[in-house]
C-alpha cells in the first residue's frame, strides 16, 4: 500500500462509523505524508521485509495509527514516538522466523533523521531558511542577508537562534527516548 492507499485506508477505518471531515482528511494526509518514508525505510531497509510483507505492514501501521492519532494529538504527545513504536512492532509481528534481526544501527539512523526533520520543521520559517542556507547550502551571511532583505547582523542572530532552538528540540527528543521503552 502506498501513501495514497494509506490515506484512504486510514479514513475508511474511522472508528464507530464516524465520517471524517475534510479537515480530518487533510490532517490525516499530512500525517501520512510526514511519516510514510520513515515507516517504509524501517520495514524495508531495517527489517528487510519483502515487498508483499512490507506493503501489508505499511497498511497495518497506518491503520493502527488512525485508531490512536486523535488521543495522541489531544494529549499533545509525540506522534513520532507512536509511529516509531508501531512501525517496529508491526515489522516484528510480520517478520518470518528465519528472517535476520533488524539492523539496530540503521534503526537509530532512521530515528535520528526523523528527529532532525521534525525539529527543522518546528522552527519558525525565517530561522529555518537562514539555518538551511548557512548549514546545508553553505552560503555566506552577506549573501543570505541580500537574498532575504536582512542585515548581516540579523542573519547571524537568526542563525544562532535557529541552532539554539534545534539543539533544545533535539535534546528534548533525546531525553524522551531515554525515558521511553525501546519499541518493537
Image (cartoon, rainbow, N blue to C red):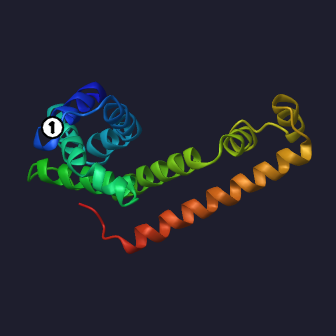
Q: Which residue reaches farthest bottom?
A: 179
Q: Position of residue 142 (x, y in %)?
A: 90, 37
For the N terminus, the quadrant is top left
Is residue 120 visible to us here? yes
**In the image, 95: left or right of 70?**
left
Q: Quadrant of residue 55?
A: top left
For the point 35% across and 32% down, which residue is it?
29
Q: Quadrant of residue 167?
A: bottom right
> Is residue 108 positioned above or below 1 on the image?
below
Q: Residues within 10 Å of mark 1 (few under 14, many from 20)?
A: some
Q: Position of residue 170 (x, y in %)?
A: 55, 60
> Is residue 128 positioned above or below 169 on the image?
above
Is residue 103 visible to us here? no
**In the image, 178: left or right of 169?**
left
For the point 26% across and 50% down, which residue is it?
87
Q: Nearer the viewer, residue 122 or 42?
A: 122
**In the image, 147: left or right of 19?**
right
Q: Nearer the viewer, residue 105 or 41?
A: 41
Q: Secondary structure at mark 1?
A: loop
For the point 31% across and 46% down, which residue is it?
42
Q: How many marks?
A: 1
Q: Position of residue 146 (x, y in %)?
A: 88, 31
**Which residue has dot 1 on it?**
13
For the point 17% across and 54% down, which residue is it?
92
Q: Which residue reaches farthest top?
A: 4
For the C terminus, the quadrant is bottom left
Q: Position of residue 160 (x, y in %)?
A: 77, 55
Amino acid at each position: 500500500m502506498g501513501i495514497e492507499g494509506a490515506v484512504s485506508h486510514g479514513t475508511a477505518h474511522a472508528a464507530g462509523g464516524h465520517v471524517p471531515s475534510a479537515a480530518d482528511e487533510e490532517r490525516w494526509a499530512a500525517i501520512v505524508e510526514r511519516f510514510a518514508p520513515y515507516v517504509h525505510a524501517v520495514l524495508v531497509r531495517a527489517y528487510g521485509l519483502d515487498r508483499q510483507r512490507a506493503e501489508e505492514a505499511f497498511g497495518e501501521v497506518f491503520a493502527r495509527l488512525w485508531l490512536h492519532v486523535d488521543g495522541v494529538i489531544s494529549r499533545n504527545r509525540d506522534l513520532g514516538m507512536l509511529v516509531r513504536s508501531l512501525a517496529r512492532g508491526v515489522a516484528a509481528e510480520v517478520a518470518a522466523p528465519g528472517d535476520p534481526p533488524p539492523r539496530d544501527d540503521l534503526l537509530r539512523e532512521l530515528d535520528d533523521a526523523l528527529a532532525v526533520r521534525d525539529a527543522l520543521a518546528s522552527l519558525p520559517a525565517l530561522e529555518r531558511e537562514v539555518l538551511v542556507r548557512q548549514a546545508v547550502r553553505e552560503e555566506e551571511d552577506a549573501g543570505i542577508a541580500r537574498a532575504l532583505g536582512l542585515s548581516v547582523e540579523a542573519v547571524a542572530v537568526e542563525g544562532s537562534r535557529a541552532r539554539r532552538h534545534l539543539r533544545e528540540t533535539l535534546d528534548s527528543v533525546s531525553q524522551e527516548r531515554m525515558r521511553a521503552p525501546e519499541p518493537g
